[in-house]
Image (cartoon, grey):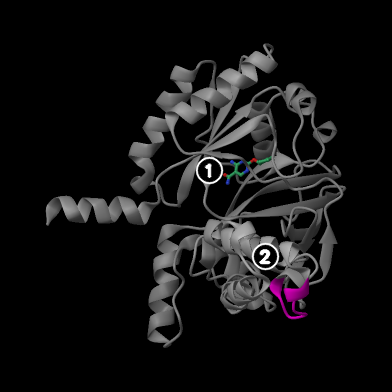
């Protein structure tokens, strides 16, 4: 988008075309968790609109999506602040990019010698707060700083312990997801009821979790895998792999497929193993997460506003593409 070539009238025209599109996509995403376009496409269009309105302030309209502070978040849910932000993950899409990330990290921090490899569960992030070992609050990630209160809903999820094995104060974070079977059965039922079906398990999980009626959530067979804590001081362990073992001891559902790796070869072997097993897993994964195993080093390395600098997500090619390619080969 070359702003310098545009007149104000042309900019206004482009902005006027982008706004309804973004409002429609935003509605799909925020109100019924069924975005019809990937986040990247939404973000690109949104950023284009921001650029146009920044370059030509006179074209801004009050109803423009850029004028909603903090994005259109559900009005029905109570807001929950995350004093310790819920970070997302930086992505890489090739072995070379992954190699660059690991080599760069070890160049900047030679002490990084051990990694924890985890499956990247394709669900949505939640945070669970416990006081003296009892579940007091559940919330969504939201924008990382402010989420939605879904306490009543998380209480209906079987894999989430109402009471921990130790009476501690702790805030645990992880992924809420819908298994492939539960997803297929839900869509079959919705078809029979003449309702719209969910495009994928992640949308189904998000739509089921952000229900105002907990009874609806209860009927959706949601699952969880927990993988992080807001404050490491709550635990004895000094490593990410140890953290997962401790979360399991506390009573949480933890994905057992994690593995410590010491070299890029071991990381790549883990990736190949689970890229091959992906279709056999009972839940959707969209990649692999590689983390610095030492919690002390994670703290030292730190994070940007949005993502940790001590972890990376290696993303698989989208499953749909995978299926289509097979179909083409067979036709
Ligand atoms: N989808 C996943 O399975 C997943 C997501 N996130 C993380 O780690 C967070 C913890 C701090 C920043 C990233 N781990 C995972 N396994």
In this view, the residue in front, 40 or 276, is 40
Residue identified by numbered label 2 = 52
Instruction: Give the image quarter of residue 289.
Output: top right
Q: Is 308 a magenta residue?
A: no
Q: Which residue, as the protein is rendered here, is positioned at the far left? A: 331
Please, which residue is most extreme toward the top here?
A: 110
- For the C terminus, the quadrant is bottom left
Q: Does residue 60 show up magenta in the picture?
A: yes
Number of other residues with Cα within 10 Å of mark 2, as a class: few under 14, some 14 to 19, many 20 or more: many
Give the mark toward the camera: 1 or 2.
Answer: 2
Query: 56 or 308, which lies in front?
Result: 56
Instruction: Tell me which image quadrant ligand 1 sits in.
Output: top right
Magenta extent = 58-65
Mark 2 lies on a secondary structure that is helix
Residue 221 in sight here:
no
Instruction: Locate residue 165 relative to residue 47 in the image: left or right.
Output: right
Q: Could you tell me what secondary structure mostly forms the magenta stretch?
A: loop
Residue at screen point 86% across, 44% down:
169
Residue 256 lies, with reference to residue 63, above or below; the image says above
**Residue 83 vs residue 239: left or right?**
right
Q: Quadrant of residue 215?
A: bottom right
Which residue sits at x=16%, y=50%?
A: 329
- Residue 97 at x, y percent in the picture: 49, 30
Q: Position of residue 281 (x, y in %)?
A: 40, 47
> Mark 1 vs mark 2: which is more N-terminal?
2
Query: Is residue 319 shown left or right of residue 196?
Result: left
Which residue does the numbered mark 1 point to in the structure image? 120
């Amino acid at each position: 988008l070359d702003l310098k070539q545009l007149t104000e009238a042309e900019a206004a025209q482009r902005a006027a075309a982008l706004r309804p599109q973004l409002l429609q996509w935003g509605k799909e995403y925020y109100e019924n968790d069924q975005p019809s376009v990937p986040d990247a496409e939404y973000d690109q269009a949104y950023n284009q609109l921001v650029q146009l309105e920044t370059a030509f302030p006179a074209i801004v309209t009050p109803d423009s999506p850029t004028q909603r502070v903090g994005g259109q978040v559900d009005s029905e849910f109570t807001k929950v602040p995350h004093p310790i932000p819920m970070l997302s993950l930086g992505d890489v899409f090739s072995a070379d990019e992954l190699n660059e990330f690991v080599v760069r990290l070890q160049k900047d921090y030679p002490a990084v010698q051990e990694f924890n490899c985890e499956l990247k569960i394709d669900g949505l992030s939640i945070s669970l707060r416990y006081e003296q070992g009892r579940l007091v609050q559940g919330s969504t990630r939201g924008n990382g700083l402010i989420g939605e209160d879904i306490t009543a809903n998380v209480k209906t999820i079987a894999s989430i312990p109402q009471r921990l094995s130790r009476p501690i104060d702790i805030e645990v974070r992880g992924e809420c997801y819908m298994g492939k079977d539960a997803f297929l059965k839900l869509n079959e039922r919705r078809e029979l009821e003449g309702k719209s079906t969910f495009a994928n398990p992640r949308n189904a999980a998000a739509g089921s979790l952000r229900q105002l009626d907990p009874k609806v959530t209860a009927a959706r067979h949601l699952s969880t895998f927990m993988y992080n804590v807001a404050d490491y001081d709550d635990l004895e362990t000094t490593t990410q792999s140890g953290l997962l073992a401790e979360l399991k001891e506390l009573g949480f559902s933890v994905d057992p497929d994690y593995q410590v790796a010491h070299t890029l070869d071991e990381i790549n072997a883990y990736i190949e193993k689970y890229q091959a097993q992906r279709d056999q897993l009972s839940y959707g994964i969209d990649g692999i997460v590689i983390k610095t195993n030492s919690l002390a080093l994670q703290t030292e390395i730190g994070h940007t506003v949005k993502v940790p600098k001590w972890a990376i997500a290696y993303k698989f090619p989208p499953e749909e593409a995978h299926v289509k390619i097979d179909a083409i080969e067979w036709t």
